[in-house]
Amino acid sequence: MRRDIVTSVIGIVVLTVLLGLVYPLFITGVGQVAFPGNANGQKVYVGGKLVGSKIIGQSFSVPVLDRNGKPKEAEGELVTEPDPRYFQSRPSATEGGSYNAAASTFSNRGPNDRATEEADAENIKAYLELNKPYDPALTVAHIPVDAVNTSGSNLDPEISSANARIQAHRIAAKRKLSLSVVDGLVSNYTDARGLGFSGEPGVNVLELNLALDRLAGGVR
């Protein structure tokens, strides 16, 4: 019996070292050498400053100002609104505020849930208010689903090309660019289907907005 106990202890120690220490360090090393960008979160820098990640959606907003020109606050949180000069990401409903990368999760709400219907209605209203002034022909029927529903992670870094082309009208007007120029940028930053057949084409919002700033000679 003593022999069995000693053998078991040795086995536990060896397997713990191999699978809990050596293997993770080996895989981490391979990732850092072969795929350093992917292994470190595909961070995006501009002028040495971290501006986001290619794989994590984020907010492109500006503070709402009060009568005195100071940023408004509500319950200790800064009140913001979409920056009309930038393409807007897919809706996010993470805990602790939208696009909270530390709270990525899905809601578990079904399509017929009352809360889902209310959230969808709010997103539709906000999308129309932001984009219809620049695209009068825009109606609810034209709004892509990714402009209404959140993604499973609530941090989708991409939007559909249909969503981007609707927003292009606003971007062109706000930045005083031709619509054809903005549509050209959308085409350049539209990713193809995975492996040529999986999923739908998507546009990385952060990369597209950075391209807009480079085109205008501005820095975000």
Image: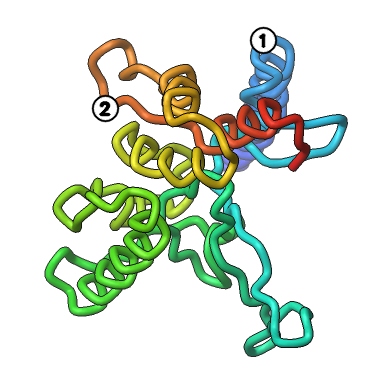
Asked if 13 appears above or below 181 in the picture, the reply is below
Residue at 54%, 35% in the rendered image: 55
Q: Is residue 176 above or below residue 107?
A: above
Q: Nearer the viewer, residue 184 or 92?
A: 184
For residue 91, which quarter of the picture? bottom left
Coordinates of residue 147 in the picture (x, y in percent) = 33, 52
Q: Residue 114, position in %: x, y?
A: 19, 79
Can residue 7 be seen in the rendering of this structure?
no
Residue at the image point whose x is 43% and y is 31% from the top? 179
- Occupied quadrant, residue 212: top right
Q: Say which quarter of the image contains residue 80.
A: bottom right
**Label 1 belongs to which residue?**
34
Q: Is residue 174 left or right of residue 53?
A: left
Residue with the mark numbered 2: 199
Tag 2 secondary structure: loop
Q: Nearer the viewer, residue 164 or 169?
A: 169
SS assignment at label 1? helix
* Disc 1 to disc 2: CB gap under 8 Å: no
Position of 82 with respect to 28 (left or right) is left
Task: Give the residue type that dot 1 points to.
Answer: Ala
**Observer able to see residue 30:** yes
